[in-house]
Image (cartoon, helix red, strand yellow):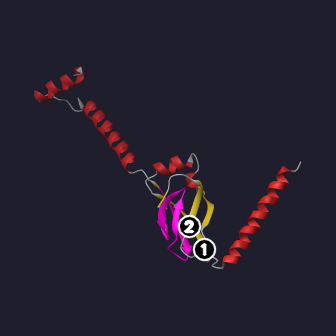
Amino acid sequence: MIATEVTAKRASQRGEARRGEGTDLRFAATRGGALCAAGLAAILMTGCLERVIHITSEPPGALVHLNDQEVGRTPVDVPFQEFGTYDVRLTLDDYEPIHEGARADAPPWEWPGLDFIAMILPIPFRTDVRWHFDLELAESDVQALLDRAIEQRNQFHAEQDGAAAP
C-alpha cells in the first residue's frame, strides 16, 4: 500500500479524516475506471462493414457459380470480403450458359484509410453490389449450331495464322 492510503485509512478509522484527505486516490481510481469503461464501450459499439452481392437473372432460377463455387440459384444474395473482378457462371436448362467477369467496386467508405474510420464509427455500413444477367434461349437447331461451331473454328485458325505471320 501507498503511505498516503495507509494514513487516510487510519485517519478514517479514528474518525479524524479531514476534508479532501484520501480523496485523491478515490478520484484516480474513479477516473481510471471511467476511462476503461469508455474504452470498452468504444470497442463494443464499433460499426461494422457488411458486403453483399445481389445476383438476379431473367429468367430467374439460374444456377450461379462465383469463382468456381456454387452459391445458389437466382435471385441470390452472397456475402463477400474482397473487392475486384469475380468469375461468374450462370446455367439454366434450355438457355445458353453465361460465363463472364463481373466487378465489385469499393464505395468511398471502403477506400484505404477511410475504411478504418468506418469500422470504428458506431454505425453499420452496408455495401450492396447488384448484378443482373439476361439469359438467351439455346438454339435447338442442330445445323445452326454446327454452322456457328465451324465459324468459330475458322475464326480461331485465322487468328492463329495472323499471329504466326511476321
In the picture shown, does residue 159 fall above or below 61?
Answer: above
User: What is the residue that sits farthest to the top in this orientation?
Assistant: 3
Label 2 close to label 1 by CB (< 8 Å):
yes
- Quadrant in the rendering for residue 12: top left
Span highlighted in magenta in the image: 50-77
Estimate the spatial distance between the alpha carbons at disc 2 and disc 1, rounded to whole Å: 8 Å
Asked which secondary structure carries label 2, the reply is strand
Picture disc at residue 135: 1
Picture quarter with the N terminus: top left
Residue at point 58%, 74% (across, down): 95
Residue closer to the observer: 97 or 82: 97
Residue at point 84%, 50% (across, down): 164
Residue 58 magenta-highlighted: yes
Picture disc at residue 125: none
Give percent across and percent down for residue 145. Answer: 68, 73
Residue at numbered disc 2: 90
Q: Amino acid at mark 2?
A: Leu
Residue closer to the observer: 105 or 93: 93
